[in-house]
Image: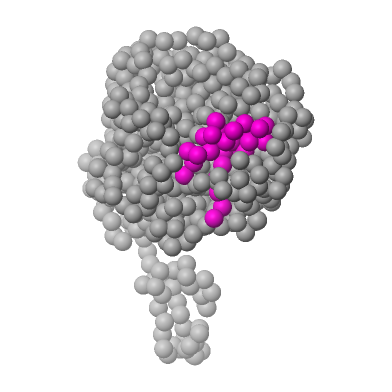
Amino acid sequence: MTNKYRKVAYYPGCALEGSGHAYHRSTKALGKALGLDLVEVKNWNCCGAMEAKNIDPKLQTYLSSRVMSIAAGEMGFDTVMAPCNGCYHNLKKAEYDLAHDPASVEVVEKLARKGGHEPYRSGSLETIHALDWIKEAIGEDGIRSRVKKSLAGIRIANYYGCLYTRPRHIFPEKDKGPGSESTAKPHFMDDILRAAGAEIVEFPLKTACCGGAHTLSDSDTSTKLVLNILEAAEMCGADIIATECPTCHSGLEMHQVRAEKNFGRKTAVKMLYFTQLLGIALGLPPRRLGVQENVSDARALLEAKGLA
Amino acid sequence: MPIHEKSLIRPENLVTHDQLVLDGVDVSGHWSTFIQPRALTDYNERLQEEIAALDGGENIHRCWQCGSCTNACTVNAINPDFNPRYWIYLIRLGMEAELVRDKDIIWQCVSCHKCTYACPRDVVPEGVMKATAHWLALNGHTPKSPAAHFDEVFTSQIVATGRIEEGRVIRQFFDRTGQPLKQDWLLEMARRLLAKLPLTLMIKMGLAAVFRPRTRRWGKVRAALAQHLAEHERNARSAGTARAAAGAPMKGSEG
Ligand code: SF4
Ligand code: SF4
């Protein structure tokens, strides 16, 4: 346990107020249980998700930078934590572009001036993911000492998706050797859940794509990609796929149903946010972690393992 | 020459002779299949320039055709015709008619960034895919793709209120693309959700659909974004259709 990240600005983003509500709930419940302060970014806006950049990449840069300017300027924080891969990625990308691309700086300054607020200046804020937050502020030893209900007996495949590690250049802190996160084979979620007692299965599709960007506009492609992930996890022996992104999570849930309905391919593996799994291990009641809100219903499995 | 990789050549470009004697040597049978020689004259020499002028296409000139992007590509794994390396090759050579043959699948790139991760030349192939899809639509080769409709619905909501309310995005998107909301799997999703959601959350979600979540102090930002995007679109239109603007004849699809 370190003193790092004990109080950070919290940027939930749009998905956590909608389909990813259970992630919002479980993240806040974890913060409370672990004594970590999360202060929600005031009056935040959408980061641009995966769509705004296809209209104009600099629109995404501006939208993300506005959130960062509030967290750093108005609120005076040096760290912002985003649990959604999309938000996390976009804030990181804005940081990178504003440090390296004068044309992006120009557009952001112009829009901020017209929008009536201070522009974000690169270097004033560190963006972290919920995985960095737990891993740094609590750490594996900290988790082990707090576990009340070990996850022993459940086999987990950890799924990180695309935007937590790609493209590599916007994550300068990764791939720095022991202790740092790996972009080829990420392991922070593995480390955290293993410390909570779970059996982690070897899962080759950790960073495969679920087709989240086209989940509705090209549904058959998304269903094929998701089915591949679900079936691979089952073949690896997993009972549960742990997730760390609301878009990945709801994509897996949605296309699990769609694969069953439209392709006649049924899979039994359940999805839980890593924050829900960690919360359960810390003895928090599943209801407070929003386990009942998940479409893929893991309650029977958790009960059978004595965890709910 | 026997052709081992026949699958890479379109059938109309292969000729097989039942009987063939070349320079007094009988080459009937296995030896008599040939690739039809052809001369290409319809190059669009500004194709690379036009695509490089659109967002994401900037680095296309750096490609050295190693194929790492296609090898890493998510969509290529489920559809071998989806081939970023090949399209970049065609664009760099100006082979517009060949590129246009694949017009209906290029938009399917899922932005997983695996290509960008793998590319040794910082081409950002993901960006090139978006620029190419954009170019195809700007030049009238394809209608707006479902993905482009989704991007527009989504972005216009951000510009309007600063935030996204998922239900509204889904309804507007289905409306624009003429799909029914009552699809089997969507109804099943709704059934499973409604069976379990606590009443308070359902009320909250219902309220969000009526009183849209919005960012405060957004008025000035909205005006600034609307103006910026209008300018941006004008620029893209003139850069991505340079030939059309210059009055040169447009080549249609030959495929
Ligand atoms: S970003 Fe697009 S082109 Fe690149 S690997 Fe993914 S699907 Fe293929
Ligand atoms: S990986 Fe990069 S250099 Fe290699 S073919 Fe693809 S775009 Fe070209």
Residue A35 lies left or right of residue A163; in this view the side is right
In the image, residue A122 lies at what x, y percent?
A: 55, 18
Question: Which residue lies at the image location 73% right of the left edge and 29% below the top edge?
Answer: A146
Q: Is residue A49 depicted above or below B137 in this figure? A: above
Residue toward you, A40 or B63: A40
Question: Which residue lies at the image location 65% right of the left edge and 19% below the top edge?
Answer: A35
**Residue A168 lies in quadrant:** top right
Q: Is residue A210 depicted above or below B172 in this figure? A: below
Asked if residue B58 is among those painted magenta in the image, a careful observer would answer: no
Residue B241 lies left or right of residue A171; in this view the side is left
Q: Is residue A104 depicted above or below A192 in this figure? A: above
Residue toward you, B52 or A91: A91
Question: Which residue lies at the image location 73% right of the left edge and 37% below the top edge?
Answer: A195
Q: Is residue B44 depicted above or below A141 in this figure? A: below
Is residue A94 visible to the viewer in this orientation of the structure?
no
Colour treatment of the image: one colour
Magenta-highlighted residues: A268-295
Question: Which residue lies at the image location 40% right of the left edge and 36% below the top edge?
Answer: A51
Asked if residue A293 is among those painted magenta in the image, a careful observer would answer: yes
In the image, residue B129 lies at what x, y percent?
A: 43, 45
In the image, residue A12 lies at what x, y percent?
A: 49, 26
Residue A151 lies left or right of residue B202; in this view the side is right
